[in-house]
Image: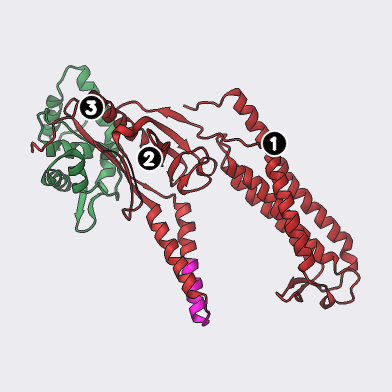
């Protein structure tokens, strides 16, 4: 699993860590039942504060993607499988948005505003 | 992306394979056929039952019907040949070759030859005896058997070409794109293939069971058995699971126990490749390995592996999934190190 952060990007570092893990899960690089690298290890490798990594892991826990267990660390949940299945659709959607000249932020806000009751047809 | 071996190598591989088939398969099967034929020819003249097992003192202590001996010979000869050659040929599915396969091609005729000599020798020694209890000791046939094994094994070894063809697939790594200030880490767990794990755990359990049995029967060998069992268990724990990490410190491969641990710092990285490893052909087996070609390996399964050519100490190999990402990041970090860009350190969170 590749975790990358770039302080020159706008997003907070913990958000970037969480996004990397999400991408890895979606790409099937880490699967349900597998353990995330320890927050201490990631923090050491990326020269981050331990709390920054823990914040990212907590975010992933709130999203239901990982389970935090004492002594076992952060374990990827079954929800990861759903994310993986969705990946091809997301990639296709993102490339369609790009070809239409839409910024990623616009697409993200569109997705956030989708009415759950709306009929997909 | 299979890189086919050069024409010359392919010819040598064909030659090595042909020699293996002759010495590792045809020869032991021929010896089996000959032994069974001799035994069948002698069948009407041996006592019934015939002696098939001897005590340490040299006196016979196990008996069976005469026909069981040729049946046993046929079964053993064919069975051992098939098992040993299957091991070897499974190790060469993608055109790999190595000393291990050559060794198996020598072991098969040596073992089968030795077994056939001892069985046929003791059988022949009972010809025209009224009862099998008068059978002579097993010592003579054992000596002949050992000599046969050694001679056949050595002849088979020197008759097969020395050849190492490794890794069917080699892919050069392409660097991951990193921004000037971007930091990245790649982490993955490499674990022993489940088949290998089952064999090792079985071996450890067997050793503990033997020690327990020895204690239960008031034997005296249990301290040694227990020590061996503990050492084997520790070795299994130390080699079945490794954390593989690539970051600003380079590559680190650390066992579940923390020891052993291998590190290759960025300035030691000369070349990075993704290779396909066949444990038998490339390293002669699984675990922590030193290959005949000088590579050091953490070899836990067949398939994709990260290979790093080091400035000192030769190539280092670890079998790990997603090795191409690891290789790409290692290359990117090394290139950045060469350009002298550090990325700004310190936490901005």
Predominant secondary structure, magenta span = helix
Q: Which residue is mark 1?
A: B18
Q: Secondary structure at mark 1?
A: helix
In primary-sequence order, the first of circles 1 and 3 is 1
Q: Nearer the viewer, residue A31 or B96?
A: B96
Disc 1 and disc 3 in contact, CB within 8 angstroms: no
- Going from N to C along the chain, the mark reached first, 2 or 3, is 3
The region drawn magenta spans: B206-220
Q: Residue B39 location in percent, x, y?
A: 84, 60
From mark 2 to mark 3, how far is it between C-alphas? Answer: 22 Å
Residue A81 image offset from top left, x and y in percent: 29, 43
Q: CA distance from mark 2 to mark 1?
A: 34 Å
Mark 2 or mark 1: which is in front?
Answer: 1
Mark number displayed over residue B321: 2
**Same chain for the residues under marks 1 and 3 in the image:** yes
**Rendered image: mark on residue B178:** 3
Residue B221 percent coordinates (x, y) = 52, 75
The red chain is B
- The reply to whether the C-beta atoms of the residues labelled 2 and 1 are less than 8 Å apart is no
Judged left or right of residue B238, residue A76 is left
Q: Earlier in the sequence, mark 2 or mark 1?
A: 1
Query: Is residue B328 part of the magenta span, yes or no?
Result: no
In percent of the image, x 77 and y 74: which residue is there? B63
Judge from the rendering whether residue A60 lies leftward or rightward of residue B61; answer left or right.
Answer: left
């Amino acid at each position: 699993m590749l975790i990358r952060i770039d302080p020159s990007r706008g997003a907070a570092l913990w958000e970037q860590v969480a996004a990397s893990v999400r991408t890895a899960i979606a790409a099937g690089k880490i699967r349900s039942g597998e353990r995330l690298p320890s927050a201490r290890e990631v923090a050491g490798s990326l020269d981050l504060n331990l709390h920054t990594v823990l914040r990212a892991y907590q975010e992933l826990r709130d999203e239901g993607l990982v389970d935090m267990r004492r002594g076992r660390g952060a374990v990827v949940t079954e929800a990861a499988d759903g994310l993986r299945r969705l990946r091809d659709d997301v990639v296709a959607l993102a490339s369609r948005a790009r070809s239409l000249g839409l910024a990623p932020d616009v697409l993200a806000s569109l997705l956030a505003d989708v009415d759950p009751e709306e009929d997909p047809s | 992306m299979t890189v086919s071996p050069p024409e010359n190598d392919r010819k040598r591989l064909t030659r090595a394979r042909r020699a293996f088939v002759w010495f590792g398969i045809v020869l032991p099967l021929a010896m089996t056929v000959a032994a069974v034929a001799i035994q069948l020819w002698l069948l009407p003249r041996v006592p019934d039952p015939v002696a098939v097992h001897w005590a340490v003192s040299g006196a016979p202590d196990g008996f069976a019907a005469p026909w069981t001996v040729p049946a046993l010979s046929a079964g053993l000869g064919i069975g051992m040949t098939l098992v040993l050659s299957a091991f070897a040929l499974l190790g060469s599915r993608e055109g790999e070759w190595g000393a291990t396969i050559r060794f198996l091609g020598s072991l098969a005729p040596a073992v089968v030859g030795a077994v056939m000599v001892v069985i046929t020798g003791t059988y022949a020694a009972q010809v025209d005896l009224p009862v099998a209890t008068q059978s002579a000791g097993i010592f003579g046939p054992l000596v002949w058997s050992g000599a046969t094994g050694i001679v056949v094994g050595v002849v088979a070894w020197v008759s097969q070409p020395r050849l190492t063809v490794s890794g069917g697939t080699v892919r050069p790594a392409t660097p991951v794109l990193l921004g000037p200030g971007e930091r990245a880490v790649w982490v993955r767990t490499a674990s022993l293939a489940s088949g290998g794990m089952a064999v090792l755990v079985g071996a450890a359990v067997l050793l503990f069971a033997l020690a327990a049995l020895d204690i239960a029967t008031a034997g005296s060998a249990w301290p040694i058995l227990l020590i061996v069992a503990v050492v084997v268990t520790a070795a299994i724990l130390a080699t079945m699971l490794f954390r593989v990490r690539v970051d600003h410190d380079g590559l680190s491969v650390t066992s579940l126990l923390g020891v052993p641990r291998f590190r290759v710092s960025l300035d030691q990285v000369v070349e990075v490749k993704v290779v396909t490893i066949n444990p038998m052909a490339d390293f002669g087996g699984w675990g922590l390995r030193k290959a005949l070609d000088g590579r050091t390996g953490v070899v836990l399964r067949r398939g994709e592996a990260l290979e790093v050519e080091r400035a000192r100490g030769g190539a280092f190999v670890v079998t790990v999934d997603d090795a191409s990402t690891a290789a790409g990041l290692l290359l990117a970090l090394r290139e950045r190190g060469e350009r002298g860009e550090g990325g700004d350190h310190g936490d901005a969170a």
